[in-house]
Amino acid sequence: MPARPVLTRLDRLDRVRLRLLAAASGALVVLLALALLGPNRSTPDTSSPVDLRAKSTNPVTPGNFTGYGFDQCLAPSQKAMDAWLENSPFLAVGIYISGNSRACRNQPNLTPTWVSTQLAKGWRLLPITLGPQSSCVGRYPRYGAKIDPTISNVSTDSYAAARAQAKAEVDKAVAAAGALGIVPGSTLWYDLEGWSNVNNATCRESALAFLSTWTKRIRNRGYVSGVYSSAGSGMKILDDARHAGRADVIIPDHIWVARWDGAANTSTSYLRTDGWMPGRRMKQYQGGHNETWGGVTINIDRNYLDLGSYYPAAETHCGNVPVDLPVYRKIMPRTKTYRPDPTQVRALQCLLREQNAYPGNLTGTFNTRTRAAALAWQQRSGLGTSTSWRKKDWMNLLTAGARPVLKVGSRGADVRRVQRALRIAIPSANVAVNGIYDAPMANAVTAYRKQVGLPAYGIVQGTTWAYLAGARR
């Protein structure tokens, strides 16, 4: 058996998950930074936010997402990302885009094309910066004080020097994000590594000044502010400041808590339960270790994200025609003793219309025009023809369309299509049609895959779609 490809962490001691913008895009970053900053690098925070959305059609990232993610030193290859998309539980990935303290200084995979490809495939990206660190961390400067100096501890003018450092990091991060096609509205994360002596007032106050400026300026640039740090240091001082209502501290929009307790949630005893809740936390709950999915091994940290709204937008079909039926029944031509359920027929007519397969009115009657459209659909589906509309025809119609990979964290119309089909395939599972791919949904998918002879895990990928469309039960 050939050896599995392994992507290893270059700096396991520091546990730093760093990414370096690809050398090929370096010139673009510089030009974009000059355009953003103009001749004066000390652009005041009252300037208009930079809008780069016209330069990219990429979606905001991570957006609304509740599910699993991973991060690592090097941005994986496309082959690795595809293997993990189809086989792993993860749908979010951390990537380091800027900061002079990065451990992985060469990122051959991290390009605008790589970013747009992952976003199009459904990945949620977590762009991270690792720049100046607290002097209390003890491991920095990593490359020298002129390359990656620590956060200034000079308290003059409310730590003005530390705030100036933060402004510079924001400008570099925004330039890097724009060059990669990471659009405004996305969360940009600052990685502040943990330290032990959190009672050191100098380190605490300089870090808070730095992070406050990071948040203020990131927001001004049109992005969402995120901060990563250990639960017992960076997160604790932010939460204490939030709880105390300190007017001089600007609290980030999202937090990424490093707490390796093995619990896939966003809780930790270091933080109060009311902070950044609901929907504004994620937690790194397991540190560096190897995982293999789809034959590809990567050394990763595991994360659980709970960001944004849990519920997807409501759906309407054909002017509020119900298509989420408790049971999808067989529809037969009308006889003296049998009359098709109008609700079932109207749902069929609506779904066929949405596939441009039925031009008639939504009458709720299984009339000649509806039967002709149903027969034409059966002929195209390859499932055999009949004068009736059968459950296997329902499954095929309900799953018609794109076939993206879906897993815990997926949301929206594609999830609903699978949920409707599963109501037919495994009625005993009582699958809710809500557009939310959660643990119960994953369990239902696992049960279905086992039922039809596929490996039993809770991911909808190409084979799963094909079996559903083929009405395998």
Image (cartoon, grey):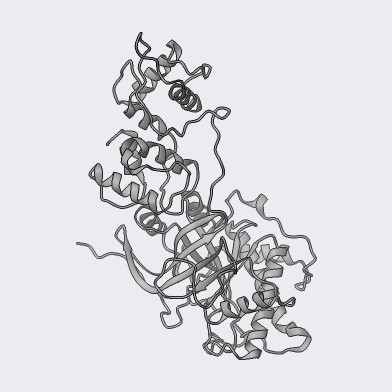
Residue in the image at 56% along x and 55% along y: 63
**Depicted 339 relative to depicted 121: above or below:** above
Number of residue marks: 0
Residue name at image x 19 percent, y 62 percent:
1
Quadrant of the image occupied by residue 185: bottom right
Instruction: Give the image location of residue 129, x and y in percent.
Output: 57, 71
Indicate the position of residue 317 as horizontal and vertical percent values: 54, 31
Placement of the C terminus among the 4 image quadrants? top left
- Which quarter of the figure has residue 9? bottom left
Residue 187 in the image: x percent, y percent? 60, 62
Q: Is residue 379 left or right of residue 16?
A: left
Q: Residue furthest left?
A: 1
Image: 250 above or below 377: below
Q: Seen in the image, is 78 located left or right of residue 294?
A: right
Residue 41 vertical placement versus 4 (above, below): below
Q: Quadrant of residue 146?
A: bottom right
Residue at screen point 56% across, 41% down: 314
Measured along the vertical axis of the image, is residue 205 above or below residue 27? below
Q: Is residue 110 visible?
A: no
User: Where residue 439 appears, x then y in whole percent?
Assistant: 39, 54
Foreground: 263 or 18? 263
Q: In the drawing, does residue 84 fall left or right of residue 284? A: left
- For the residue pair 90 and 170, the one nearer the viewer reads as 90
Question: Nearest the camera: 202 or 177?
Answer: 202
